[in-house]
Amino acid sequence: MWLIVKPSILRTGIIFGVLLIVPVPAPAQQVTVDADPSHVANTFSPFRALGAAIDRLPTGTADRLLTDPVLKEILGAGWQTVTYRQNTELMVEAWHWNPSGTWSNAAKQEGYFTGSAEPAEMIRHSWAYPLPHRGCSRGDGNGWSRLTDGDLKSYWKSNPYLTRDFTGEDDSLHPQWVMVDLGRKVDLNAIRIAWADPYARRYSVQFWTGEEEPFYDGTTKGAWQTFPLGRISEGKGGTATLKLVSWMIPVRYLRIWMTESSNTCDTHGPDDKRNCVGYAINELYAGTLGADGQFTDVVKHLPSRDQTVTWPSSVDPWHAASDLNESRGDQVGFDFFFNCGVTRGLPTMVPIAMLYSTPDDAAAESAYLYKRGYPISGIEMGEEADGQHMLPEDYGTLYLQFAAAIHRLVPEAKLGGPPFEGTDGDVEVWPDAAGKVSWLGRFVDYLRAHGRLDDFTFFSFEHYPLMDREHHLAWSDLYPEPERVNHVVQVWKDNGLPPGVPFFMTEGNMTGGGERPDMMGALWLADYVGSMMTAGAAGTFFFHYMPVAGHSRGFLLLDKDYHVKTYPPQYIATQVITKEWVEPVDEAHRLFRAASDVKDDKGNVLVTAYAVERPDGQWALLLVNRDHDNPRTVKAIFREGNSVRQFTGPVERISFGDAEYQWHPEGRGGHAKPDGPPSRSSVTGHPGATYELPKASITVLRGRIE
């Protein structure tokens, strides 16, 4: 609020022809906590529920980041438990979590690798093997599809564990597919498929009717329609040129939907049945077939990401020792990880590779960890199956196969997943026969139909709400976060998350590219943690925990020699959350819902609030003032039924905002001045007391109430 003094004649008799604009604090508004003991929103230990996520690290950096003095600085932020992220699945790679193990074809050092379950030498590093039968043109890393690489000796092959020999179900229940994105609509009437072994005996060639892409936003805004001549019931393999229609159809997206295999063996021979099931294609072509039989191809065939884009339903995890590529990053060896200090000795959530691995390898990994005696809170099954465009029934059958193998060796292991990549709502997939599109709902249905729902002990997901706005963020993007969190959690419950199954956000941040250097990231983080825990999460894990030396963005800024340059806003905000809002002890905190009537003229809530009753008997209010330009003054009310309580006596006030941190951009870099720490003061609580919240700030009020 501003007090405007009009021009006037002052005592001197001089007329001032300007307006004197004097800022006046806005009148106090109210934050109300529902402190009724029967209305507890969540109960959690900060040591178990407020943590961070550690992913694959650049090659050669683990020994610097996970040892002191850098590790001491990282831990100084206050995140406690950690989740170990499994990046190789996103890269479409096989992960050798243990460099020691056995190949299915030991003589040639190729095939399907199983890491050794027996503890021996310390595992300090673990590496990835890009899959030679990859069918994806996109995704993380720099791999490309073998479907349009122009090499008739290379081929895509589907995952053998999705066939009847392993699922126990007819192959038609787990159709495999490849999709081609031509980049724009092209008039076509034909396709050419250079089949490898095993080839499809029964398949359909289809086109997408929607205007948007068939995944994510466009999933339910179109349909796959089989070409009039696109249904094949007696495929013979070889190179098949198919006229799909007697006229031209403008098409951008094509799909080959395969339901019956020849079960003939691929180039790796008949000694392993996994070589002889599923589907394989050397190369795909699409275009026109003239009356003279001349085929004109519109597909771009290149061994790089400049090729025509393809996506497959799955990929065979077959690979060879020669595929090893250590330059793609270090997954950090389990023994080094658990003994370096980064876990603080707390139970850790670990992954198994599932989309591009084998049940035996996953079981061996689990057995290894338990034999070592490492505290494991849960095992995440695979990584971002939705991001790999896997249908929920395919993920479901892999889940059950891998769960059975793990539980044979480690009966007590707690399993869950998928984990979803960041999403604002339920993941939707192409409708099944019943028209159901919910990925989560169909996955749960699959487990339930097989009597195995007890194997699903937790649900996990990632959260990057502003991923698509990373380079175009506006301050107003902060406002939807609490509603966004509440919405997505409710959607998952509505679409089948079983009651009583805990849910974890196992990796997330405001965007996927790391922290902004200004206060926006700090405010988002406080709002996110408060809202996710209020929504009932069993745990939330911050990503971009590990810094990159010499990088200008991140959780902790290091120079090229690994010396701390500065503590960015999310680092300091973490300290406020983990050391001031909650008590840094492994004891239960009770979280209560809070509401605020501080809004702008558009109805946006400008001050959000999150209240915990701590083990030390104090109440702590985490208050986020999202007003970019103005301080706000609030009253704090705690309601228990018909009674009203307020802070009384000394109230600690910890604040982090514009007065404590300002970022000054300079070309491609910049610097912070001031750069923390939070300010501290003590105020007196009493009936009617008000508390000032600086503009764009995080404030904790902590004391006792009466």
Image (tube, grey):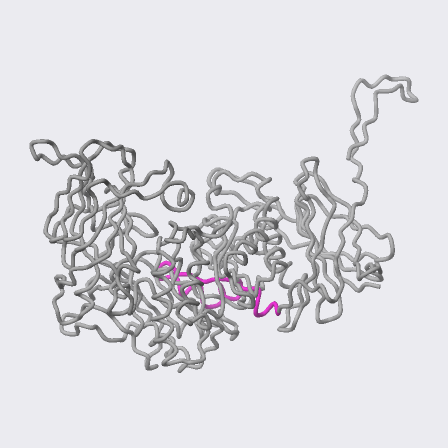
Highlighted range, magenta: 45-73
Residue closest to the far right: 11
Q: Is residue 54 magenta?
A: yes
**Rendered image quadrant of residue 489:** bottom right
**Residue at 25% across, 67% down:** 164
Establish if 336 lies above or below 230. below
Is 278 situated left or right of 36 in this image? left
Is 675 situated left or right of 186 in this image? right
Q: Quadrant of the C terminus?
A: bottom right
Q: Camera-side residue: 232 or 13?
A: 232
**Rendered image quadrant of residue 627:** top right
**Residue at 14% across, 55% down:** 196
- The spot of residue 242 in percent (x, y) is 15, 42
Q: Camera-side residue: 661 or 452?
A: 452
Q: Is residue 232 magenta?
A: no
Establish if 437 lies above or below 348. above
- The spot of residue 25 in percent (x, y) is 79, 40
- Disc tally is 0
Q: Camera-side residue: 401 or 91?
A: 401
Q: Quadrant of the N terminus?
A: top right
- The spot of residue 82 in percent (x, y) is 50, 66
- The spot of residue 613 in percent (x, y) is 72, 66
**Residue at 40% across, 57% down:** 384
Residue closest to the far left: 292
Establish if 573 lies above or below 184. below
